[in-house]
Every structure is written in C-alpha cells, then in structure tokens.
Image (spheres, helix red, strand yellow):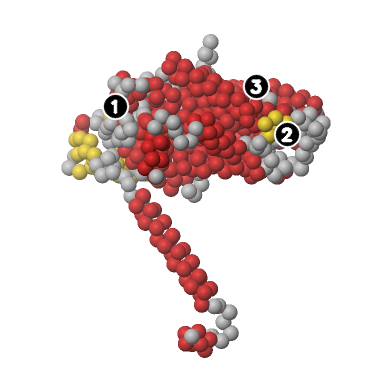
Amino acid sequence: MTTSTRMDSISPDSQMSRRNFLKLGAAALGALAVLEISAVGLMFLQPRSLEGEFGGVVTAGPVNSFPPGSITEFPAGRFFLIRADDGGFLAVYRRCTHLGCSVSWDPGLNQFVCPCHGSHFDELGDILNPPAPRALDTFLVIIEDGVVKVDTSKPRTREEFESSQLVYT
Amino acid sequence: MAQTDMKQKAGAEPAVPRQVERNRMRAVMNNIILHLHPTRVPAPALKFTYTWGLGGLSTLLVVILVATGILLMFRYDASVERAYTSIQYLETQVMFGALLRSVHHWAANLLIVTVFLHMLRVFSTGSYKQGRATNWIVGLLLLLLVISFNFTGYLLPWDQLAYWAITVATSLLGYIPLVGGIINHFLLGGSEVGQVALRNFYAIHVALLPPLILLGMAYHFWRIRKDGDISQPQCQENVEKFTTIPYLVQIELAAAVLLIVGLFLWAMSVPAPLEALANPAHPPNPAKAAWYFLGLQELLLHMHPLAALMLPAILLTALALVPFGEQRSDDIGIYFRSRIGKRVALVAALLGLALPPTLVLLDEFWVDFPTWLPSLPTLISNGLIPLLLTLGGLAVIYGAFRKGLKANRSEATLGLFLFLFISLIVLTLIGISFRGPNMAWVWPF
C-alpha cells in the first residue's frame, strides 16, 4: 500500500504498473543473462589453437649451406627457403594462396606447382597463372651470426614479388 | 482380494486377453501413422511415380544414419593420432565394423541423391506454390543441413581425401567477404587443418547438426499436413480416395524394405573407401573433393573463388524466392506443368547436357580473361566477368523459353531450374571422370 502511494508520488503520470515494471526488469535481466552466457560460450570457444603446433621460429642452418639459386624444403616448418641468384634469402609458405593445398617444387619445370587446381609459381614464389590470386605468402627471415632462422608464426601476404622482400646477410 | 487378483494375472490366463492387447497396440501404432499422414489419400497421390517416395526414403536414410552413427561413435577417436587407426581397427578387427561404416557412408551418399531428386520432384510438379513456400524454404535449409553433415563427416576418417577436401573447402569459406576469415578461423582454430579442426568437425557432426535436422524434419512433416498434404491438381473432381491404412502404409513399407535390402547389399559389396593417412605435406594429385562437391570444384577451375561461391549463393537465394514470384496455381501437381512445359523441359535438359561441357572446354583451351585483360585485377577479370556472363547466359536462356517457346513464367522458371539441375550433374560428372593430374582435362576413354 505504502509503496504504491510512494511510486505515485514519485511519478504521478507514469503509466507503468508495478507488474509491468517487474516484467520489464525480468526481461532485461533475462536478456543480460543470455548475453553473458553467449559471451561465455564465445570466449570458451575462442583461442583454441594448440601450443607446440607449427608456428614458431625455425632454425634453418648456416648461411653457407644454402648456395645461391637453391631451394630447400622444410616440411616441418611448412616452408621453402629460397636463396636467389644474387644471394638474397626468401622463405615462402608452402600453402597455395588459392585454396590452401601444399605446393611442391618441380625441379624440371623450375616452378612451384599446386596439384589441386593447377596454379604455378616461379622460383621466387611469384604467381605465374591463375586460379591463385597472388604470389605465395612469405615468412620473416632472420639472419643472426651467419645462421638463417625463419619465423613461421605469421605468414605475410604479398601481391607479387618485389626485390625488397629478399633478406641479405 | 488384491492378492488373488495378482495371482490370477501371474497365471496362465492374462488379465487382458491377448487379442485385446494387440488391438490396443495397433491403435497406438495407427495413431502415430495418422499423425504423420491424413486418414484418407486421393488415389492419384498414391501412385508411386508421382512422389517416387523420395521424402520417405530420405527420412528412412536419416534414421539409418542416426542409428549407425551412434554405434560408430562408440568406436571412433577424434584425435589426429588415433582417428585413422581407429577407423582401420574398425575395418579390420571390429565385428561388423566395416559393414556399419559402409552402411553409414553409403546411406549418407544416397541421402544426397534422394534429397536432390526430392527437390527435383517438388519443383517439377510445382509443389512449392500456393502456401507451400515456407515448407519449400525449410526443405532448402534441410538440403544445406544434409550437405553440412556430409562435409563435416568426411574429415573424420583423417585420410588424404578428408584432409585435402577440408583444406580446400575451408579456404573457400575464407573468401566470403567480411565474415569469411572469422568462420575459417573458427572452424580450423588455426591456420591449417589439425587437431582443433578435427575436434570441431566431430562436435558439429555428432552434437550440433543432429538435433537441428531432427527439428527441421519434424517441422517439414507437420507443415505438409498443415498445407493440405501431398500436392494434387486443383481441377480434379470426385477423386477416389483410399484410406491411409493399409493402402499408403503398404507402399511405404515395401519401399522401406527395398531400400534397406538394397543399401545393405551395396554396402556389403562396395566397402566405404579409406585412403592413405592424411599427409599435410603432399596433397594427392589430383586433389579432388567428395563426388557431390565436384560440380562446385569444377566452377573453381574457371572462376575466382569468390565468384565460384557467389554463383551457388545467388542461385540458392533465387530458388528460395521462386514461390513468391509465381501466382499461377492451375498447374500444381502436374509433371512439367503443361504441353509447352514438357517441350521447355526437354529443350532445357538437352541444353544442360550440351552447354556446360562446351563452356568448360572453351575455358580450358581458349578463353583466358586474365591474360586478355592484364590491366584488370583477377577478382574482376577472373571473377566478376565470368560471373556476370554466367548470370547473363541464364537470363538469355529464360528469355528464349519465354519468347521462343511461348512459355509462361511458371514453365520458363521450370526450364531454367531443369537446365541448372542437369548442368550440375554434368559438371559433377566432368569432375569425376574428366579431370586428371593437376586437374587438367583428360579423356577417360
């Protein structure tokens, strides 16, 4: 009794009855609960990449073990280490930029070939023919104390080959 | 008093006579059947060649898939290290393991066939019109669910086909503007198919999708009753009607028994395939998806992935909207609508057989927009241009049906649908038999 009169005194022209106020409150709390549960669900599902899987720094070897004009595959690191004729290093991710198949190096053709949809890439990973939309992705090459290391944590996309992508000792 | 009653019940003579009990059980059974079906069915709707029993057969296949799937779950390990070996163990050591896996595999393949044919039947008889639009759309969603089931299911054996088909398909999803990257990352949980992806696909396959498809099916069936049961021509008068029990139920039972026998015989003679263990370094050459995706994979050879994705999306949306663009109801329940409709259907089928292979060969050996138009980005030269040409071609075909064959909208739409349906089959066949190493064109004979 007293509460209703108090509410009346606070907002005399308010149309909201106590029942509707409680309904609205319950609905708002319900919506909040749904939001919270969805957030819990999303965050629960969020970072699920496993530790220890591919994506760390791979030590390739001493600079001298890679002659200019050579291509060396690192299956565990999922990349090819290219040493261009001028001595520059480039690490290309073996994942085809079209639909993710693994390209392989064809020494006869002197090209990277994707077996899934027939894209070809030249000896620097540059795109030769569609359906692949761009050159093979690259990884950061670090040369420390004459040793080549490749950081496979983040593939870097590129449209085409540019000489600035090569890393020199 | 009560004790003597009990004694009587336990004795040789049951309290409820056996005949009465049997009648009661039959009443319950009939009650269930009559919740799914009307009490009486018009004679023409009973004809097997009207529906071909495709909805019912699809339902039975889902039941078989659920039953075999539950059993398979008891023997399967969803881990990269053990998935393949658990399948090998199933194939070689487990009693009836190879049979159950084979039945599950072939039932899933057959389900793709039956749901597509079911859609063809419904479209050819105009059974999506006049208040059936909602159920038509529910049917399309069920089709997508069936495809999702197959898609998530075939990563599970963790063999070469599984690994590379999922790699290609998830990369394809990555091309969807804005959300593609998020979906891709969610499904894979990383940059490549691995343990997280396997676990995801397993959870989606066995826990997320089954309730969805069961709810969808329940609604689909309820809606058929709500919309006035099996579609029938409206002009018919004084059609003879038969009671559902036994006339319809007999036919259904016969079809069900034939399907079960056929499926098991097939599964026994053709075991479910299992390729070599997945090897992330070396895709098989050629790397082909499962046969029901080869039509889509064929599109990928000719278009930018975004365009190859847009085309089915546009066509599927158009398919969902078809019932809203047609007012005609006098041709419901008649195969191919009318005499003109039959002619349109024939021309569409021939066109569907001839045009796609011609275009595929032209594009394989001659057409090369990216080289012809080097100044344009490939998204336009290899994406937008082929997509617009394809859609434009479809518009021309529709126009030719309207003007050349004097078809009304309903007949011309059917023609376009049949053309696309046959084209999809032809593209699928090309993908199965005419694609060799590096997905280059080969002659199988």
Q: Residue at x 54, y 39 (%)?
A: B217
N-terminal of the pair, mark 2 or mark 1, is: 1
Q: Which residue is mark 2?
A: B232
Q: Marks 2 and 1, Cα distance to the nearest angstrom? A: 52 Å
Hey, what amino acid is under mark 3? Leu
Residue type, mark 2 in image: Gln
The vertical placement of A15 against A6, above or below, is above
Asked if marks 2 and 3 touch (Cβ < 8 Å), the reply is: no
SS of the residue under disc 3? helix
Decide if residue B308 is in sight here: no
Q: Nearer the viewer, mark 2 or mark 1?
A: 2
Q: Are marks 2 and 1 on the same chain?
A: yes
| Occupied quadrant, residue B166 | top left
What x and y, as percent, mark residue B248? 63, 28
- Seen from the viewer's position, the closer of residues B400 and B371 is B400
Q: Residue furthest top?
A: B445
